[in-house]
Image: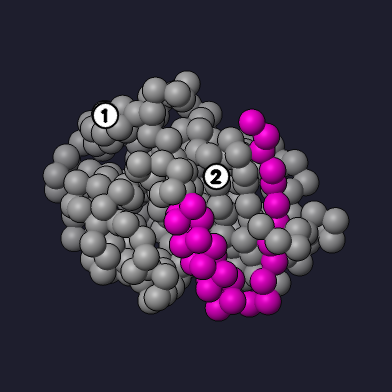
Amino acid sequence: MTNERRVLVHPDLDSLIAAVAARFLTKLTDLLDEYHEVNIALTGGTAGGQGVQHAVRDSPMRGAIDWSRVHFWWGDERFLPKADPDRNEVQAREALLDHIPVPPENIHPFPASDEVPDIDEAAQVYAEELRAHADPSLRLTVPRFDITFLGVGPDGHIASLFPEHDVRIDDDRLVVADRNAPKPPPERLSLTLPVINSSQRIWLVLSGAEKASALGLTLAGASPIEVPAAGAEGRRRTVFFVDQEAAEQVPQNLIASSY
C-alpha cells in the first residue's frame, strides 16, 4: 500500500471550502460503492470543520449519499458540557449532522464533561467506543477511518496534539486526556498520532497567511514533536488542501495539479 502526499492550492477560502466539500462527496460516493460502511473523522475549526460541513449540507450532491451507512467520529474535542457551543460536536451538528438522515447510533462524539465528569475516564470511554467498532484488518483496535479531516494551527498543532507539550503525540494509547492544553479551554480529549495515522486518507485543510509557516515546516520534514502536523501520514494518501495565502512557503514542485 503506497501513501501519496499532495498539496492542492485554491485561490481563496471560499473556493477551497467548495472544492473540499465537492471532493468529499465524490469520494464518499466511491467509498460507499466499495464498503458496506464508511467511517469519517471530523475536525473543528473554520475551514476544514464548519466551512466544509456547511458546504456539504448545502450541496445538491448530499441527496445521493446513503447516510445510514456513514459513521462520524472526531479527532479531538474540548472537554465541556454537552450543549456548549465551543464543542466540535455541537458545531458539526449545527453545520451538517442535524440536516442529513444519519442514524443517531452512527454519530460517535467524545463524552462531555456533564456526562463523564472525569476527563481520564472520558478518554477511556471513547477508547472503548473505538474498540467496539474496530476493523480487524488494522494493527490498532480502531475503526477503519476512510477519511480523517484535520485542521492545522499556526503553531502546527493537529487535533489537540500540541508542539513540545507534555502530552506525547506518539502515545501508545488510543485517546489522551490533556488537562493543561496551551490553547483554551485547557481540558481536551484527542486521538493519538498512531490512531490518526491508521486512517486510510488524511485531509488537512488550511487557510490564511498565519498558517503558511506551519505548512512550510510540515512539508520541509520538521520533527512531529515540534510541528505535530509533520507527523500526519495516512495509509493511502495525505492531502493538504490550502488556499493561496497558506501556500506562500510551499515549493512549486510540491504543488499537485489534481487530487
Q: Earlier in the sequence, mark 1 or mark 2?
A: 1
Residue at horizontal 40%, vertical 75%? 60
Check residue 21 for magenta coloring.
yes
Dot 1: element: helix
In this view, the residue farthest toward the left is: 115
What are the residue bounds of the magenta stretch? 1-30
Q: Amino acid at mark 2?
A: Arg
Residue 177: percent from the left, percent from the top?
35, 36
- Percent from the top left, x then y, of residue 225? 61, 36
Q: Does the magenta run of residues contain 151?
A: no
243 to 178, vertically: above or below: below
The picture quadrant where one finds residue 82 is bottom left
In space, the residues marked 1 and 2 are separated at their CA atoms by 21 Å
Above or below, comparing residue 70 to residue 140 in the picture: below
Name the amino acid type tagged 1.
Ala
Relative depth, front residue between 140 and 162: 140
- Tell me the residue at 60%/39% (across/down): 236
Which SS does the magenta portion mostly show?
A: helix
Q: Label 2 belongs to which residue? A: 201
Residue situated in front as seen by the camera: 56 or 11: 56
Q: Is residue 135 above or below residue 87?
A: above
Q: Which residue occupies 77% across, 46% down?
A: 220
Tell me, yes or no, if residue 209 can be seen here. Answer: no
Q: Which of the image's four quarters has the C terminus? A: bottom right
